[in-house]
Image (spheres, grey):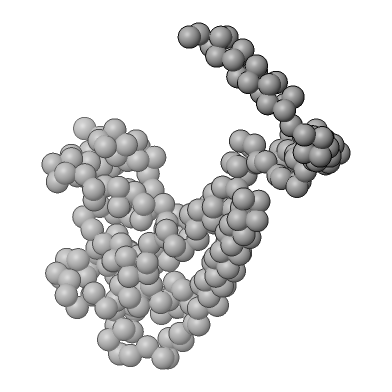
Amino acid sequence: MAKRLGVTVVALLALVLSCSASAESRTVKEKVEPKVSWAQLNTEQKQILAPLEKDWETLPGLQQKRLLSTAKRYPKLHPHEQERYQARLTDWVALTPDQRKAARETFKDMSRLPPVKQHELRERWKEKQAQAQPQPIN
Amino acid sequence: MNEKDFSDKVMHALNTGLQQIDGSKLSRLKKARDQAMVAYREPVSILGLVTVTGPTSWVKYNLIQKSLIWLPLIALIAILAGTNVFKEPESEIGELDAALLTGELPINAFLDKDFDTWLRGSE
């Protein structure tokens, strides 16, 4: 009985340690994601990510990779979405990683709501924005 | 027959049998009992976790000890929870980023405390 328990404990500890080591290597991998220079981008990528040309070299490799991933979707977007995309790029990269993560989480939570509720939230946001605008003087 | 009557009968039968055992068998039985008594130890508890008992040093695991066996498994789940295993894959992050960059609501809406409160209220 004691021997069997000992073997179980040792096996589980080994599993924990191997997973821990594996997790660490994944974290390290994220940190050392190779950077892509602006010059390495093709013409289309440069056009899509044009608002970031000045700051591109300062962005971490992982962020560059994610931006290039979003840029792949750009050609399929509607013109008004393409406009939004480029207008928001600089604000997006200016956020901290935690802020971007929080925004993703909130977006995901909202996406899980029924369309009616999502619409209500959008309307409520628009109302808030309208109230924040300075009122015209009569 | 109640329990006491039964035990009395058993005891009587054993005593009768005992008187009929010849000297050599009796001597062997006594020797075996003495050896067993020498080897016998009182159960020893170590820090209230493990109890060592019996002539062959059996280890008995109490409830706490048994629960400690699950610790590595709990640790494993905790580690996995904190690593990429439960994190969203890069492709999903790419989709989310693209949706945030092109969606109807501006990005700052998703960082706004009021908006977050409304969202929690809608869930």
Q: Quadrant of residue B49?
A: top right
Determine whether B91 is above or below A135 in the image: below
Could you tell me residue B58's position as x and y percent?
71, 45
Determine whether B59 is above or below A61 in the image: above
Q: Quadrant of residue B44?
A: top right
Q: State the residue at coordinates (32%, 36%).
A: B120
Nearest the eye: A117 or A57: A117
Could you tell me residue B53's position as x and y percent?
75, 39
Could you tell me residue B118's position as x and y percent?
29, 36
Q: Is residue B8 visible?
A: yes
Q: Quadrant of residue B41?
A: top right
Q: Is residue B62 left or right of residue A91?
A: right
Q: Is residue A67 left or right of residue A122?
A: right
Q: Is residue B116 left or right of residue A112?
A: right
Total labels: the figure holds 0
Q: State the residue at coordinates (62%, 59%).
A: A7
Q: State the residue at coordinates (21%, 70%).
A: A82
Nearest the eye: A105 or A18: A18
Q: Is residue B18 left or right of residue A10?
A: right
Determine whether B102 is above or below A51 in the image: above
Could you tell me residue B84's position as x and y percent?
46, 63
